[in-house]
Image (cartoon, rainbow, N blue to C red):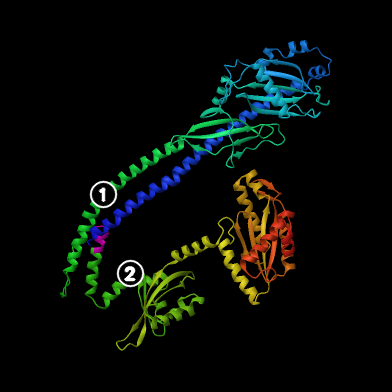
């Protein structure tokens, strides 16, 4: 297979796989994210519609109370006022229209109507939903009063504070109904009746609600709800109807739908609002993705063509020429030279080959030039390990002069703790040619250390006797630093710098083995969880929560003799391993931690003094002899501490079993 064919066979599948991967990821990740945004947007509009309805109910309830808590209404129920005059002066149709009511009814404690005013819209202007239609205004009046009695809206029990608001469906007509107990103007007298008022949904009211929400809004009769419906939160101690939100349903690629259903005071579903909106983000995101993929494909094909032309004329043909010239080199006394291939890397390669050919024509000088031309350090040591030959790269790498390295024992260049290991590796290179590489820390002439990789092979005479070793030394400090960095990423919590769950699990097993072997005494495991930590994120933001976790970790480390045995498992959960600690010592340390973490924190300009720890302690082998059992015991003790709040609890099997 030619190099041209090999490159094409590698590049073409890679290009296809890349485009397929981009398409698959965009479909699964980006479009799903766009769809989720549309879902959240539709839910937000449904919550907004629910909030608008609750605001209407709250406003009408507040307005109705001003009439219910009025000496005029109170005296009329006591029989001290004139009904006709009260109706004429306070409940004429014009006043009802100004109050945005279609009717208002004053009833006594027996539910009997004392005075009432009805000014509803025409039956044809109402918006009936479902198959039922209102028969007459009189029948609507009877059903509204009967429904109010059945729902217990007229049973105030003498409580002047009694108030309620409902969204009802009467004879298929949506209705907003409010009721308030009647008392004197101060609301101090015992309630002696009820004031009932409300309005019917007509075209104007539905249009007003439609204008304040995005999407198509429809009023529908109730349906049965399953477990997927979400109960909406209500303000505490408010006489507002309960609402439920349905899961979103997809009508097609362009539209989505969600439903909001309200219930009466008996929990029966009454009225359903259906909100239909467009999947704007999903549609536009799909268009953008398809445009991007098409453009990417065109660019990739154009780039592939340009790369092929460039490789063909600037690389492949020149490599073919170079290959032919090298193949023509034989055993001539005077080695031929390859042609000049320009000033790029291939030109540098041809120049390097010519230089190599010239050096091959020389003996000792040639060897020296070759060694000095390489960037890695080259060395030769005798059987005793003393340096006999080296290149300038080794001098630069280790920072020594020529006279400082010559005849110097190789082990003196190593860091002290690497000497024995290096000797063993030299012996392995002598006995086994397949094990000739090792990495160690070397001391430079300026006192600094660097990580180097050494490839060593044995030098033997014709009879096989060992003459010494030759090797290549390469600086791998950056690679080793990167590996150490990866190790920290794997075993360190990036926020607090403490050990993470992986480091904890490995150290726990090690300490358990030591404790069970009897070499280190008992092992105490402490689980530390923060109470009220979620309130910090909710009240001050996640940046403050992260800063608080860092401050807590610092306090915990400050109070420990072995801070390296402190770990953060995630969230606000920390663990501590105490080798050779008794139950009393662990309990005492836990109390000190409570005192330390109990002091207020100043985080991002905020004083946080409500976050307290709960600590659970379990000991090995007293409570458990395996990692999973010990973790479970400490976790159980910690949850018992959380129930007591800000406590240190030592695991007690009997107490754990007794707790629910």
Q: Residue 129: horizontal and vertical position, in percent?
A: 57, 25
What numbered label is drawn on residue 454? none
Give yes or no for contact between labels 2 and 1 (Cβ–Cβ under 8 Å).
no
Most foreground residue, 337 or 525: 525
Quadrant in the rendering for residue 282: top left
The quarter in which the N terminus is drawn is: bottom left
Image: 125 above or below 237:
above
Most foreground residue, 526 or 308: 526
Q: Residue 180: horizontal and vertical position, in percent?
A: 74, 25
Q: Residue 186: horizontal and vertical position, in percent?
A: 81, 24
Name the front one of labels 2 and 1: 1
Q: Which of the marked residues, 2 or 1, is nearer the chain's N terminus?
A: 1
Tell me where the magenta segment starts and ends, as one range.
341-349
Q: In this figure, what is the number of numbered marks?
A: 2
Q: In this view, does 385 lie to the left or right of 461?
A: right
Residue at (63%, 17%) from the top-left corner? 136
Q: Reply yes or no: does residue 344 show up in magenta.
A: yes
Q: Residue 625: horizontal and vertical position, in percent?
A: 65, 70
Q: Name the residue under label 1.
A: 306
Q: Reply yes or no: does residue 516 show up in magenta.
A: no
C-alpha span from label 2 to label 1 = 35 Å
Which element type, helix, strand or loop, lies under badge 1?
A: helix
Q: Mark 2 points at which residue?
A: 374
Does the rendering let one see residue 88?
yes
The quarter in which the C terminus is drawn is: bottom right
Q: Is residue 564 left or right of residue 478?
A: right
Q: In this view, does 345 lie to the left or right of 84?
A: left
Residue at (41%, 85%) from the top-left corner? 384
């Amino acid at each position: 297979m030619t190099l041209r064919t090999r490159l094409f066979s590698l590049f073409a599948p890679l290009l296809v796989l890349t485009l397929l991967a981009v398409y698959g990821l965009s479909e699964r990740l980006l479009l799903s994210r766009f769809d989720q945004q549309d879902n959240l947007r539709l839910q937000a509009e449904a919550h907004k519609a629910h909030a608008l309805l609750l605001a209407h109910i709250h406003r009408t309830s507040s307005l109705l109370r001003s009439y219910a808590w009025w000496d005029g209404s109170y005296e009329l129920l006591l029989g001290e006022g004139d009904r006709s005059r009260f109706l004429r002066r306070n409940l004429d149709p014009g006043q009802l229209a100004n109050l945005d009511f279609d009717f208002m009814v004053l009833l006594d404690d027996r539910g009997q109507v004392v005075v009432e005013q009805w000014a509803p819209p025409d039956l044809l202007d109402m918006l009936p939903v479902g198959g039922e239609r209102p028969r007459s205004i009189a029948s609507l009046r009877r059903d509204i009063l009967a429904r109010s009695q059945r729902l217990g809206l007229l049973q105030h029990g003498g409580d002047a504070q009694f108030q309620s608001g409902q969204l009802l469906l009467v004879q298929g007509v949506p209705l907003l109904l409010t009721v308030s107990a009647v008392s004197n103007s101060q609301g101090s007298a015992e309630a002696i009746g009820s004031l009932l008022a409300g309005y019917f949904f007509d075209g104007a009211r539905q249009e007003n609600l439609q204008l304040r929400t995005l999407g198509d809004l429809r009023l529908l009769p109730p349906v049965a709800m399953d477990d997927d419906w979400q109960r909406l939160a209500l303000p505490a101690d408010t006489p507002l109807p309960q609402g439920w939100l349905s899961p979103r349903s997809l009508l097609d690629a362009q539209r989505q739908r969600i439903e909001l259903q309200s219930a009466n005071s008996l929990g029966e579903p009454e009225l359903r609002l259906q909100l239909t909106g467009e999947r704007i983000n999903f549609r536009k995101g799909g268009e953008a993705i398809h445009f991007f993929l098409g453009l990417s494909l065109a660019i990739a094909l154009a780039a592939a063509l340009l790369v092929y032309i460039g490789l063909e004329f600037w690389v492949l043909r020149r490599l073919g020429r170079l290959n032919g010239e090298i193949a023509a080199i034989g055993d001539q006394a005077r080695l031929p030279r390859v042609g000049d291939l320009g000033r790029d890397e291939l030109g540098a390669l041809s120049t390097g080959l010519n230089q190599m050919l010239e050096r091959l024509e020389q003996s000792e000088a040639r060897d020296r030039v070759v060694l000095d031309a390489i960037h890695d350090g080259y060395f030769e040591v005798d059987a005793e390990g003393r340096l006999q030959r080296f290149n300038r790269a080794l001098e630069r790498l280790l920072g020594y002069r020529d006279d400082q390295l010559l005849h110097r024992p190789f082990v003196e260049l190593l860091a002290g703790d690497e000497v024995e290991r290096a000797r063993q590796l030299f012996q392995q290179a002598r006995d086994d040619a397949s094990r000739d590489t090792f990495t160690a820390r070397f001391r430079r002439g300026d006192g600094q250390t660097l990580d180097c990789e050494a490839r060593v092979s044995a030098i033997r005479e014709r009879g096989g006797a060992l003459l010494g070793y030759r090797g290549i030394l390469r600086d791998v400090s950056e690679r080793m630093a990167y590996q150490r960095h990866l190790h920290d990423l794997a075993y360190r919590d990036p926020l607090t710098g403490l050990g993470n769950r992986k480091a904890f699990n490995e150290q726990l097993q090690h300490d358990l083995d030591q404790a069970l072997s009897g070499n280190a005494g008992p092992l105490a495991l402490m689980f530390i969880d923060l109470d009220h930590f979620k309130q910090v994120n909710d009240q001050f933001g996640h940046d403050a929560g992260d800063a608080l976790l860092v401050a807590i970790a610092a306090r915990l480390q400050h109070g420990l003799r072995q801070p390296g045995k402190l770990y953060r498992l995630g969230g606000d959960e920390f663990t501590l391993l105490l080798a050779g600690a008794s139950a009393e010592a662990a309990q005492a340390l836990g109390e000190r931690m409570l005192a330390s973490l109990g002091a207020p924190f100043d985080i991002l300009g905020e004083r946080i003094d409500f976050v307290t720890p709960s600590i659970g302690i379990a000991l090995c082998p007293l409570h458990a002899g395996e990692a999973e059992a010990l973790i479970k015991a400490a976790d159980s003790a910690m949850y018992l501490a959380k129930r007591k709040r800000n406590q240190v609890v030592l695991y007690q099997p009997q107490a754990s079993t007794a707790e629910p």
